[in-house]
């Protein structure tokens, strides 16, 4: 029973790292993203392959022009290979909205096709994170990540929210931070 409880706690610590990554990207909190990785970790995002410092620079540059980003983490299977090594396969849906200034990212999805003036591109990405987690100094963090793309759907955004709705923000003015008192 003690071993089972210990394994449940370890799984939860791994899931916490996955969720820190998702929140960090969506709120542009790059220190939070970094906390999900070991400092010598490696990430293969397709458009970026390399170490964590370069990943953070790449994400920060791209997300500076991404108007909205929301990661949904789904099924997560964690297999322990040894006492300090685990592999997690996590299904993920990502919704992102890009204005004209997000040219670098828009070109990934549309090529050289221009975005109609004044319009925004909405991308829906289905992917899986295949992560090697390592337990070092008491912390489960990502040592190696491969983002496996399943499908991407991109369309010109047709509906805009009416006034009166709480609008998502990608910084400390988001409703989350007000609720947390920061």
Image (cartoon, rainbow, N blue to C red):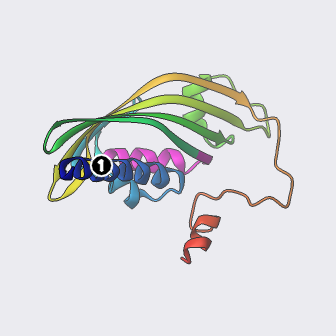
Q: Residue 166: which quarter of the image?
A: bottom right
Residue 92 x/y as whole percent: 49, 35
The answer to whether residue 138 is left or right of residue 114 is left
Q: Main secondary structure of the magenta part?
A: helix
Closest to the observer, 163 or 11:
11
Q: Position of residue 128 (x, y in %)?
A: 43, 30
Does the magenta portion include 54? yes
Q: Is residue 116 visible?
A: yes
Closer-to-camera residue (33/120): 33
The answer to whether residue 34 is left or right of residue 173 is left
Residue 42, image quadrant: top left
Looking at the image, the residue that sits furthest to the front is 1
- Residue 109 among those drawn in magenta: no
Q: Quadrant of the image for the C terminus?
A: bottom right
Question: Percent position (x, y) of residue 150?
Answer: 49, 21
Residue occupying the point 61% across, 38% down: 95
| Residue at (32, 57) in percent of width and height | 35
The magenta stretch is 53-69
Q: In this image, 54 relative to 23: left or right?
A: left
Q: How many marks?
A: 1
Residue at image position (59%, 65%) is: 176
From the image, tell me which residue sits under label 1.
8
């Amino acid at each position: 029973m003690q071993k089972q409880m210990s394994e449940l706690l370890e799984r939860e610590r791994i899931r916490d790292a996955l969720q820190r990554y998702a929140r960090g990207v969506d709120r542009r909190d790059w220190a939070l993203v970094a906390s999900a990785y070991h400092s010598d970790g490696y990430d293969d995002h397709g458009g970026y392959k390399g170490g964590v410092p370069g990943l953070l620079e790449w994400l920060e540059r791209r997300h500076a022009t991404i108007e909205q980003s929301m990661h949904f983490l789904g099924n997560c299977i964690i297999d322990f290979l040894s006492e300090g090594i685990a592999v997690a396969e996590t299904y993920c849906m990502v919704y992102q909205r890009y204005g004209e200034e997000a040219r670098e990212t828009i070109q990934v999805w549309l090529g050289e096709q221009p975005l109609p003036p004044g319009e925004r591109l909405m991308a829906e990405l289905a992917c899986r994170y295949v992560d090697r987690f390592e337990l070092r100094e008491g912390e489960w963090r990502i040592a190696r990540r491969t983002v496996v793309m399943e499908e991407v759907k991109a369309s010109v955004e047709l509906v805009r929210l009416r006034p009166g709705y709480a609008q998502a923000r990608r910084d400390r003015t988001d409703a989350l931070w007000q609720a947390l008192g920061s």
